[in-house]
Image (tube, grey):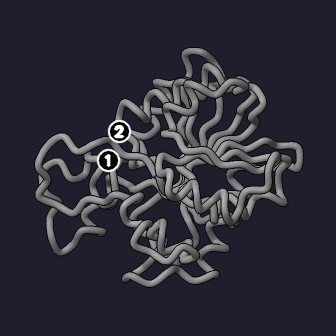
Amino acid sequence: MNHPNPSAPRNYPTVDYDEHARTCAPDDFWAQVKRTVGGKVVSEEHVDMIMQAIRQHLAIEPKDIVLDLACGNGALSARLFRACSSLVGVDISSYMIDIANQHFAVPPQFTFAASGAAEYVCAEAMPERFTKVMCYASFSYLSEQEAQTTLQTLHSRFVNVDRVFLGNVPDGERAAAFYAPRIPEPGELTDPRARIGIWRTRAEFAALAASTGWDTEFGTMPEGYFSGYYRYDAVLHRRSAPNASREQVNPGPVQ
């Protein structure tokens, strides 16, 4: 999970995933990354929904080398090992990367490294080896500058990546439904340190992607998914033409 250092007083709940993970049992993987509802870890059924969405939208093939940005403790990443040739997971939390390396890493094919998302994509020595990139439920915790740098660098340096899956993005048009009955505090919806991170409408997200060379296709989770009522999925494809922007919206659930 990625986040900058706090720079101003905040009158709303914030989150520090590294700090939180250290309060959980070493093998309570879903609790460590706050994949919970009402303080209880989500069911295996919901985890299966997540994996189905990742596989469908990322279109993973056995030959793919996957980069998982802000991967947390690697529990989700590990479920992709059998579907791809190799995977590298990176996360800013050294504690969660230690857990990933202890419980899930299978070097040299499946490895984990402690790094911020923007930092990693700028420093990766062999970016051309990767073919798919994902960031699940963590993109909102990148600052605006980190998000811009990450997408721009993926486009310019990771030349063999044709698909980026950014899952479980908080929808700016549905923030009221999530926060009801209270009203979000000033700055809460645009703060990467806030509990949910930065909220973006689909139009705002598509504009961000277009400014860094990507077209955007949107999707939603099946009815009944625990956070589906206020989030969407985004799949990025390389721009089809230098001056063209394509925004495709799929309002239906993942099949």
Q: Position of residue 172 (x, y in %)?
A: 32, 52
Q: CA distance from mark 1 to mark 2?
A: 6 Å
| Local SS, label 1 | loop
Is residue 84 toward the left or the right of residue 224 in the image? right
The numbered disc on residue 203 is none
Residue drawn where x is 33% and y is 52% of the image: 197
**What residue occupies the far right of the structure in this picture?**
62
Circle 1 residues within 10 Å: few <14, some 14–19, many ≥20:
many
The numbered disc on residue 143 is 2
Q: Is mark 1 in CB contact (under 8 Å) with mark 2?
A: yes
Q: Position of residue 201 (x, y in %)?
A: 37, 47
Circle 2 residues within 10 Å: few <14, some 14–19, many ≥20:
some
| Residue at the spot of label 1 | 192
Q: Position of residue 40 (x, y in %)?
A: 44, 84
Q: Position of residue 17 (x, y in %)?
A: 40, 59
Q: Nearer the viewer, residue 170 or 8?
A: 8
Tell me if residue 157 can be seen. yes
Residue drawn where x is 28% and y is 42% of the image: 5
Q: Quadrant of the C terminus?
A: bottom right
Tell me if residue 223 can be seen. no
Q: Amino acid at mark 2?
A: Ser
